[in-house]
Image (cartoon, rainbow, N blue to C red):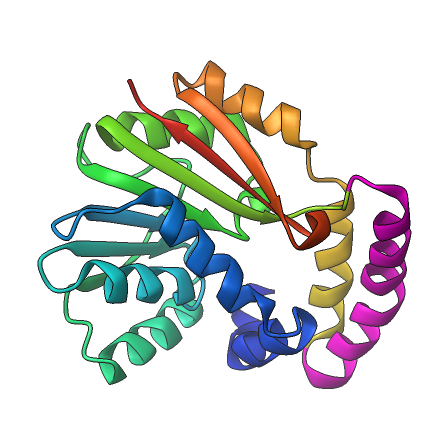
């Protein structure tokens, strides 16, 4: 499914988020407070928008590894990165639940719009903690349902009725039926925070953006 949506994935992201996805990613990078020499892992990178934003932010003194299990997505991300001259970004096919890195490799780990697709989220956080250096930070940006009723009702109307119709016209229908259902079944904010704490992260917090349409979870490895 992800391979089939890859050709129009960026276009649909911009249309369906009303271009807000760029703002959300910039907020994640700002929250992480990355050093110029940071070594960062971006999991479930897709076409690499967050990895590219991180690479631009830290500059050539740092390094970004962008990992995803879907190679057609990675190819598009790698091409975008090359056009921007971001030679300190590396693209890798891999499994977020079995990371191909030794312990304590990265200064920071990010996941944008990918956590809800992982079948074993506690395992994913355990793997993140394993490959993160002490005092390293993890940031998870994910689509969520707004918590307050008026916004939640409007969001459900958009996600369940309007979004699939746009997806059907511009891309692959089943992918944009899957998207709102994956958000509906995504764990609540407190549960995700609990997964992070159980994996060993401290100073776990979360922040809603855009009326709770997305949420950013942050944690620190002691």
Q: Where is residue 176 in the image (x, y as percent from the top left)?
A: 73, 66
* Residue at x 85%, y 48% (from the top left corner): 152
Front position in the image: 48 or 120: 48
State whether residue 84 appears in this view: yes
Quarter of the figure that contains the N terminus: bottom right
40 relative position to 189: left or right = left
Q: Which residue is drawn at 74% across and 75% down?
A: 167
Vertical side of 169 occupied by 116: above or below: above
Query: Closest to the observer: 55 or 26?
Result: 26
Q: Where is residue 209 in the image (x, y as percent from the top left)?
A: 62, 50
Question: Residue 77: which quarter of the image?
Answer: bottom left
**Residue 100 visible (yes or no):** no
The image position of residue 17, as x and y in percent, is 65, 68
User: Which quarter of the figure has residue 158?
Assistant: bottom right
| Main secondary structure found in the magenta portion | helix
- Magenta residue check for 175: no
Is 154 in front, or is 2? 154
């Amino acid at each position: 499914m992800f391979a089939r949506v890859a050709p129009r994935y960026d276009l649909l992201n911009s249309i369906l988020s009303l271009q807000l996805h760029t703002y959300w990613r910039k907020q994640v990078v700002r929250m992480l407070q990355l050093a110029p020499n940071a070594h960062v892992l971006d999991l479930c990178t897709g076409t690499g928008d967050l990895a590219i934003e991180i690479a631009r932010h830290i500059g050539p003194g740092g390094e970004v590894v962008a990992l995803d299990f879907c190679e057609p997505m990675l190819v598009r991300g790698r091409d975008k990165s090359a056009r921007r001259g971001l030679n300190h970004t590396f693209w890798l096919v891999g499994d977020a639940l079995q990371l191909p890195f030794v312990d304590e490799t990265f200064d920071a780990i990010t996941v944008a719009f990918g956590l809800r697709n992982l079948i074993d989220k506690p395992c994913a956080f355990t793997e993140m903690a394993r490959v993160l250096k002490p005092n390293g930070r993890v940031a998870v940006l994910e689509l969520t349902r707004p918590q307050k009723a008026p916004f939640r009702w409007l969001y459900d109307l958009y996600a369940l009725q309007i979004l699939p119709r746009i997806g059907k016209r511009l891309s692959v229908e089943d992918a944009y039926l899957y998207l709102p259902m994956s958000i509906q079944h995504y764990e609540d904010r407190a549960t995700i925070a609990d997964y992070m704490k159980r994996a060993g992260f401290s100073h776990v917090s979360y922040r809603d953006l855009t009326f709770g349409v997305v949420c950013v979870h942050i944690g620190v490895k002691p």
